[in-house]
Amino acid sequence: MKAVRYLFLFIFVLQSNAQISDFDHINFRKADSIALACKNEDLGNLPQLSHRLTSSLNTDVERFRAIYKWVCSNIANDYNLYSKNKRKRKKFENDQDKLHAWNEHIKKEIFRKLLKRKKTICTGYAYLIKELSDLADLDCEIVHGYGKTSTTDIDKLNTPNHSWNAIKLDEKWYLCDPTWASGIPNPKTNMFTFEYNNGYFLTNPQLFAINHHPINSKWQLLEEEKPSFETFLEAPIIYGKAYTNLSFHHMPEKMHNTIQRNEKVSFKYQLLKSADVEDINLLIDNGFNDKRIQPTDTSIKNQQLTFDHQFESTGFYDVHLYIGNDLISTYTFRVKA
């Protein structure tokens, strides 16, 4: 009975967080089509744009969806500006006067590029989402904090580097990240490819917390114990496809792990959608070669994915989880004798 009770509590916690499943009864097709129909609109008249996106929709969530989908589909991520800002903030991190002056300068550049060229970085995305939402009489906030991707150097992550939004719908707050949802910047070419990722729209806060950490902990939107900044830094790397496949990442809890040879390592996830056992595989890289394996004891029940793995040899391994062709997460394992 105790095991059943804990399972019930686990499922309840997953469902109690504000997330997109609260709106399974809503069809976003009309909101998305309106966003698409307004594709060539510029930012010269935001009240008019907000009205065109929202005036014919019946619910707040649909109105916000049209705004969010339009921003993600029309505003390009300016990786060159992001890199420039990152370098300058690093250069001035020990000189508060110069850092403040730079921050004031970059704000102007961010909004100039946003208005003139429809290109920006996370601050511009979050600002535009809030501005259009405010004009539609929706309660929206900009959330500042730390974002972590596969290219983030966590040893140097000592100042906030990312912004996203919280939106209030039906008296509950929800999280979304329009920057990461909009597409993929190429650091080598500074080119941007629009590729909308719906997983960042009204995301489960427990999954969101793995690679987002707000300055103000209230915006974690977690009723249970909130992850500390150290927990956030130690968490695994998850990728954009994690947000389209998972509602929650449970285990392993850390990116870097030290274990004994032949020790069982447990992997546990809550899936957003059904998957076949044959789709679950690990790519294991020992620094010399890599191999893709299918775990032999994979179980998928009630959309909960679990499996174990044992390392038979000592060494250092990068382990990447795939569901089909989608890269989900990365971990490292130091295997000792």
Image (spheres, rainbow, N blue to C red):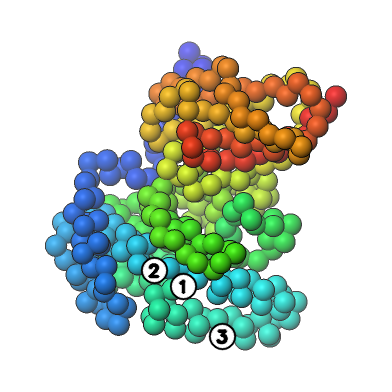
Tell me: residue 42, above or below residue 337: below
Tell me what residue is drawn at x 53 percent, y 24 percent: 306
Q: Which residue is mark 1?
A: 120
Q: Which mark is residue 299?
A: none
**Residue 5 shows in the view:** no
- Left or right? Give the position of 218 relative to 135: right
Quote the CA–CA distance across marks 2 and 1. 7 Å
Q: Amino acid at mark 1?
A: Thr
Residue 333: where, in percent of width, then height?
73, 34
Q: Amino acid at mark 3?
A: His
Q: Which residue is mark 2?
A: 75
Image-quadrant location for residue 225:
top right
* Secondary structure category for the residue under label 1: strand
Quote the CA–CA distance across marks 1 and 3. 14 Å
Answer with mark 1 or mark 3, whichever residue precedes in sequence. Answer: 3
Residue 57: where, in percent of width, then height?
17, 59
Q: Amino acid at mark 2?
A: Ile
Nearer the observer, 328 or 301: 328
Tell me what residue is drawn at x 26 percent, y 74 percent: 41
- State if disc 3 and disc 1 touch (CB < 8 Å): no
Q: Which residue is mark 3?
A: 105
- State if disc 1 and disc 2 touch (CB < 8 Å): yes
**Residue 282 shows in the view:** yes
